[in-house]
Image (cartoon, grey):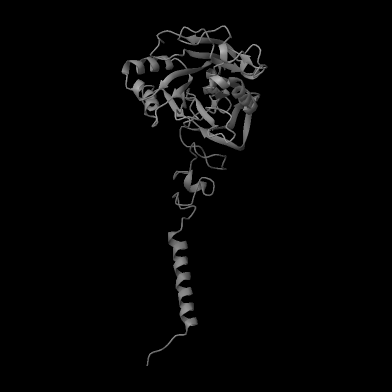
Amino acid sequence: MVKKYSKYGIFGIIIILITIAMLIFIIFGHPRCGNNVCEGGETAENCPEDCLINASKCRNESYPCTVENIPCCEGLVEVLSAFPSETGCIAASCGNICRPCGDGICQENENNCSCPEDCMAACHQNITIANWNLQVFGDTKASNSTLMQIYSSIIDDYDIVFVQEIRDVDGSAFSRLCSMLPNYNCQNSSRAGRSTSKEQYGVIYKNGINIIEWTDFNPDSQDRWERPPLKVTFNTSCYRITVYNIHTKPEDVKRELAYLENATVNQGNVAVLGDLNADCSYYNAATEPEFDTWHWIIPDNADTTVSPTDCAYDRIILNDDSYSKYSTYGIYREGIVSGVSDHYLVWVKLET
């Protein structure tokens, strides 16, 4: 005689089997905090004992805050978690951290607030920021080794360089240029432009300088600019500056600069630079109101163009805070001829 089970009995058996399977997974298969293994689902926040403290029970550089009775690992010391601002040092809320402070080197994750003995010397140095419109920089120019050597040798003299008019679709030209600058890091913006001719901004910055904010205004839902600006905030061991970079449309300089001024946050050290086309028939900086309370570093009578025209198209504009650190400026012309670019490189030096 075959024993029959009701549908409710079968359903109960299935529930029991599922429950047993779940218990087995929880006991044997689910990550367990405290087993000295940083497993799936565990992070530095929800399980620091597995993910940030090693088997010898010491804190490494990744551990964010003070933990009682757990010392720093060998070679590290406990320092205040703080970062520099325009008004001084600001302490983080989490407490102390472990750093290789005292080794005489201002490491990437140290600053003059958390490790002054290593980093204060860097606070008495200068920082140079430059802009260079390379004029239709793409595969053709990138395949010319002579040109690339000129570009890299000039850029290598500055701490931060914004490169404009990057035209190639795949970005390989800019990558090739960056490969020739081993002491620098590189990032580029999205491709922008209302026509089929698109451009990118490239940012080249020395090792030891960190980007802590990157805002690409492209795409712009309000269609305010032909090539929307790029906003980048840089941080060194003891200095922070925000740079707005833009290549304005020549026929629309006044309106694009007005939109840029409205979008600019004038707080802390701020600079605006780029091929602004802000001179000659396109714009009269002496009479127009855009950025008129700021400091125009490249003067109106300067010539930043390689062609016979005498125009200060390329500009550097500083707010009051960044101008307080202003040292000098320059227009680099040596070796820049037609075929290299139709623009000279412009730069400013700030005392940090």
Name the residue: 48% across, 41% down.
Answer: 58
Is residue 279 visible in this depiction of the protein? no
Tally the numbered discs.
0
225 above or below 348? below
Which of the two residues, 154 or 288, is positioned nearer the viewer here?
A: 288
Q: Position of residue 149 (x, y in %)?
A: 35, 16
Name the side, left or right, on which 105 lies relative to 283: left
Which of the two residues, 263 or 57, is positioned nearer the viewer here?
A: 263
307 above or below 84? above
Which image quadrant: the C terminus? top right
Name the residue: 55% across, 42% down.
Answer: 69
Name the residue: 47% across, 62% down.
Answer: 26
Q: Position of residue 83 (x, y in %)?
A: 59, 29
Q: Quadrant of residue 231?
A: top right
Q: Position of residue 254 (x, y in %)?
A: 61, 20
Name the side, left or right, on which 91 lies relative to 197: right
349 above or below 95? above
Name the side, left or right, on which 143 lies relative to 244: left
221 above or below 164? below
Is residue 93 visible in this depiction of the protein? yes
Q: Position of residue 1 (x, y in %)?
A: 37, 93
